[in-house]
Image (cartoon, rainbow, N blue to C red):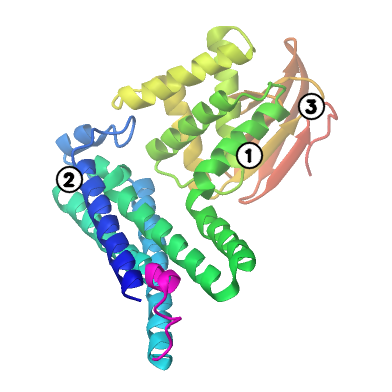
Amino acid sequence: MKKAHFISVAILAAGVLIATECYRISLTSPPPAGYLAYCDTAIAAGKPCLTEVEKNLIESQDSLSKWLLGLAYTTLGGMLILRVKNWRSTQVTSALPMIACALLVLSLFGAFLFQIGIVFTLSNGPLYHLDTGVVWVPLLTQFWSLVGALALLALWLYGPRRGIRIALLFAAAASSPHFAQAAGIEQCAQQWQETHGFTADAKLAATQAQLVELLAKRAEVAIPSSCDFTDSVLDRVRFAAREVKHSRSASALAEYTDSLVEELQTNAVSPEEITNALVRGLKFWEAPSALVILRASRTKDATIDTMSCMTPCTVRIGPGAHKIQASDAGKIIYSCPVNVKADAVLRIDVEAGRCPQ
């Protein structure tokens, strides 16, 4: 029993020291590329630096931390009750439950570091620490300490085979909300490549996901869970890449996507017109609007009012009257006026020639 106590205290002490040192090192980390790149300009103009996207990020991180904190408190409370009810039993004070309790306390320490990090960053700055280890070290400490504690408790209560299964299921369920959005955008980009005739390219998908996130920050809109948002951005970028590079190749698209990412990261004041147009288009996603999805068996040029794309493409437009056209080799093959209502979804095959009712 004394050996179990010694091991648990040693693990707790080592975890606290490592988490604290990583947190301390994070305080001197340089700004991450592209994050809050426009803050200096905004502050100089006397405007708030945090956009709605950053505020939503803080709220999401805080909710995750509180959820992990509540689970750690509940589990540790259950262990204390179990110890009181079985105070004569040596099983409760064996190695596995004692180490699990140490990890639960370490998870609580991670929650404390997280709150300190948020308060410190918002009160003293610099605000780019909202995307550095000042926030992520405490969150990861919370999460993995809790997962480790629950894994050990599962092994102790249910035996090795069933315990490992339960621990793996919990880890998958607990981590999926945390990484869902970042992974989701990249997955949407990969699906977009497949549906638009490009060979799957993980590097390009990662760059496209980065572009979508940067544009959403600039537009101050939250990224929806569906792929329509990502599709609409990449469709506009694809059309612009063809116009600028005079090519439909994947290499031309990759080069142009890289240039847009670089522009958003380095030029915070006066972005080019295509970037401004992309940002303006994203504003529709948080206002009453309709979704238009244009399809064709082969690639066609399409326009909705003044917005251009190549089929297949997804465009978000405001409610009211619009004109949709499609052309093939310069010849108009589809032209139709539409009057759309908010939240409507129009799926149009431009080769069928029918106007939506």
Label 1 and label 3: CA atoms lie apart by 23 Å
Q: Quadrant of the C terminus?
A: top right
Report which quarter residue 64 is drawn in: bottom left
> Which is in the foreground here, disc 1 or disc 2?
2
Note whether 153 is above or below 126 in the view shown: below
Residue hosting label 3 = 296
Kindly identify the residue that appears in the image at 44 percent across and 21 percent down: 260
In front here: 330 or 238? Answer: 238
Mark 3 in CB contact with mark 2 (< 8 angstroms): no
Q: Position of residue 117 (x, y in %)?
A: 23, 54
Task: Residue type at mark 1: give it.
Answer: Ala
**Which mark, residue 321?**
1
Q: Is residue 30 left or right of residue 185?
A: left
Residue range in magenta is 88-100
- The residue located at (21%, 42%) in the rendering is 25
Q: Are marks 1 and 3 in contact (CB under 8 Å)?
A: no
Decide which of tag 1 and tag 3 comes sooner along the chain.
3
Quarter occupied by the N terminus: bottom left
How many residues crowd mark 3 within 10 Å: few (<14), some (14–19), many (20+)? some
The residue labelled by disc 2 is 125
